Amino acid sequence: MQQKVKSDTRLEKIQDCEVLGRLNSTELAVRGSTQDVSDASLIGHHSASQRRRDRIHLHREGLTQCPVIVPVLPFDGEQLMPTSASRARRWVKERRATPFWLNGVWCIRLKFEPSARNKQDIVVGIDPGSKREAFTVASAVHTYLNLLSDTVDWVKDAVETRKNLRRTRRYRNTPCRKNRKNRSRGGLPPSTKARWQLKLRVVNQLRRLYPITGYAVEDVKATTHSKTKRWNSSFSPLEVGKRWLYGELSKLGTLTLKAGHETAELRKAYGVVKIGDKMSMSFSAHNVDSWVLAKDALEAKGRPENTRLTHCRPLQFRRRVLHLQNPGKGGIRRSHGGTLSQGFKRGSLVRHPKHGLCTIGGTRGERISLHAQEGRRLCQNGKPQDVRLLKRTSLIFKAIKHGIPLPPKGGSLLPKTQ
């Protein structure tokens, strides 16, 4: 006669049996996995169903969920509404779409005719700044892209250096050169023109990814003071530059302007906070303003569900000059500057067998220098025949590492032609 033995359900006994398996007496008599218990958030490894339920709860509580939305382009080049990452991966797996990287964003190009080409309103929120600027591409429901861009702040010093060098050459016995028409003074000052043209260049790159219909910009204003000539004159280029940008954006779509105090009120209404560290690579530094501007233009509600960032860095080129400022051996000043290196446009994105993705720098003899995407120089003796040109660009887009997928080692960075 068999003797019944009671199963040991003590905690230490259950932990000893984890390696061998689970005890039948400790399994739940309910539907689902044994990990789906009331306090499942405290368990290290959740089941798939529990993870989905936790994400739904986070979304209901207004916390960030950070979904990945993928831009979609058809074979004719017209921008379509973005899709989810899971659907994009399924289309790529079924060979119904071609993946590629464009401006630091993973995109797909369809190989079939879509069933419909309906589009929603998509607005770009722009927050101008002196050191960094923020761009947010959003619809009424989703936040597609948060872009943090550096500003072009070196033109003023370059123009000052050029002026001083020209003044010193006036005392030298050199022939007089007449002013050319493209050097005539007028229009926007060089530093102001470079700053506001960068915003339009970034917007044109975003229009390659999304069907953008409108723009919301924080209107930068400067109050004029009486009997202060220098104060008023220093802000006049800013007013001229922003009027030029507003005119160009009005040609591309609807334009909405908000004052600085209105943007602060919108942050309070949406329940978001802006930090004081302006040079921080975080969503709360600048992109929180561009996000509320875009959502307010769409009359949408909610909280930021996508806080990933993509960094944009404009390249600084050393323009061609007569010679270096300091002479070399023998008092000879060699020529300096230029935008071509052994036939390659400087700043172009290339692939090297040893250094991988890099950009073209200067040249010496028959060799070229290669730089990493963040600006660090990799070598000065690169052979032109070893590099493969991928893209000519003056803007470097790179995804910030925390939370966004980076381009794979062997992945493509350019759209593939059919």
Image (cartoon, rainbow, N blue to C red):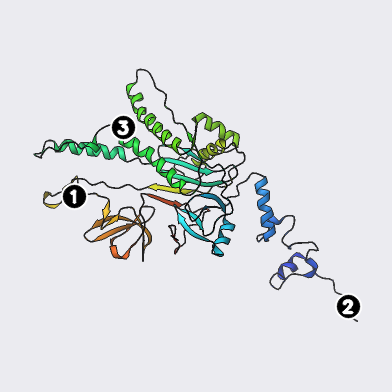
Question: Looking at the image, which residue sits at the far left?
Answer: 173
Would you say the residues marked 2 and 1 are in contact, meaning their CB atoms lie under 8 Å apart?
A: no
Residue found 81% across the figure and 63% down from its top: 29
Q: Earlier in the sequence, mark 1 or mark 3?
A: 3
In front: 301, or 89?
89
Q: Earlier in the sequence, mark 3 or mark 2?
A: 2
Residue found 24% across the figure and 34% down from its top: 184
Q: Earlier in the sequence, mark 2 or mark 1?
A: 2
The amino acid sitting under disc 3 is Gly
Residue found 39% across the figure and 22% down from its top: 224
Q: Count neighbours of disc 2 (C-alpha within 10 A) and say few if under 14, some if 14 to 19, many if 20 or more.
A: few
* In this rendering, the label closer to the viewer, 1 or 3: 3
Residue found 32% across the figure and 56% down from its top: 360
Image quarter (top left, top right, bottom left or bottom right) of the C terminus: bottom left
As drawn, the label of residue 335 is 1
Residue occupied by mark 2? 3
Would you say the residues marked 3 and 2 are in contact, meaning their CB atoms lie under 8 Å apart?
A: no
- Vertical side of 224 occupied by 51: above or below: below
Q: Secondary structure at mark 2?
A: loop
Question: Looking at the image, which residue sits at the far bottom?
Answer: 1
